[in-house]
Image (tube, rainbow, N blue to C red):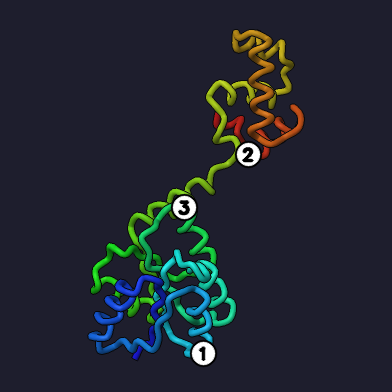
Amino acid sequence: MIKVVVVDDHDVVRKGVIAYLNTEDELDIIGEASSGNKGAKLVADLKPDVVLMDLIMEDGTGIEATKQIMTEHPDCKVIILTSYYDDEKVFPALEAGAFSYMLKTSSADEIADAIKKAYRGENTIEPKVAGKMMNRFRSSEKKPHDELTQRELEVLLCIGEGMTNQEISDSLYIGIKTVKTHVSNILSKLGVHDRTQAAVYAHKNQLLKKI
């Protein structure tokens, strides 16, 4: 039997979920709580396999409770069950150690299935949340030079070749003031202090071969 604790401050939601889960032969609902703090204490006392955790509660949020549970009981699997999927809720919950993330629009069958999967070590991530995770992953792969415009890349190439502002101006047929603006933007976007560091950055990242 999979031992489960349900934490949600809405009595109707909590009781409804428990009523359905009690019909599942594999699940044993050993406790329920109406706040994050009570939920964390209940987990310490009962040591469930899986916790179904709401996020927004008055006496201790689901994020705080999840963090405490994962610190004290790292083998326990916490499934977030919430109505929220904005970045301010999703990522802190996952960073706190939540194993799965579901929305309350999920069907009872889907929730029960997520609990069984969590027990087997399989994550369940709401598609909307999974999309956010992928977007963050992609953005984390971006490097500073990805923010440069095509013209700024051209100016960086010139800097990498040791050209002065006047030489860049003549080569690209742009005004000297425009060159200075591009150089300033390049230094800012690359997070470097001077032209020498910008040139080193360009060579280190093999940008001169790409431009």
Q: Secondary structure at mark 2?
A: loop
Residue 102 placement: quadrant = bottom left
Please give the residue where the numbered disc 2 appears in the rendered image: 205
Q: Secondary structure at mark 3?
A: helix
Binning the other alpha carbons within 10 Å of mark 3 as few (below 14), some (14 to 19) or many (20 upward) gives: few
From the top left corner, tell me how far across and down residue 79 is, in percent.
Answer: 41, 72
Which of the two residues, 62 or 70, is positioned nearer the viewer here?
62
Q: Nearer the viewer, mark 3 or mark 2?
A: 3
Which of the two residues, 94 or 44, is positioned nearer the viewer here?
44
Q: Quadrant of the N terminus?
A: bottom left
The residues tagged by marks 1 and 2 sit, at their Cα atoms, a distance apart of 54 Å
Q: Earlier in the sequence, mark 3 or mark 2?
A: 3
From the top left corner, tell me how far across and down residue 89 is, in percent.
Answer: 47, 58
Residue 51 placement: quadrant = bottom left
Residue at screen point 54% across, 48% down: 140
Q: Earlier in the sequence, mark 1 or mark 2?
A: 1
Q: Earlier in the sequence, mark 1 or mark 3?
A: 1
Residue 106 placement, left or right of 36: left
The residues tagged by marks 1 and 3 sit, at their Cα atoms, a distance apart of 32 Å
Q: Quadrant of the C terminus?
A: top right
Three-letter amino acid code at the position of disc 1? Asp
Which of the two residues, 54 or 116, is positioned nearer the viewer here?
54
Please give the residue where the numbered disc 1 appears in the rendered image: 45
Q: Nearer the viewer, mark 1 or mark 3?
A: 1
Residue 32 placement, left or right of 202: left
From the top left corner, tell me how far across and down residue 177 is, in percent.
Answer: 67, 11
Three-letter amino acid code at the position of disc 2? Asn
Q: Secondary structure at mark 1?
A: helix
Please give the residue where the numbered disc 3 appears in the rendered image: 87
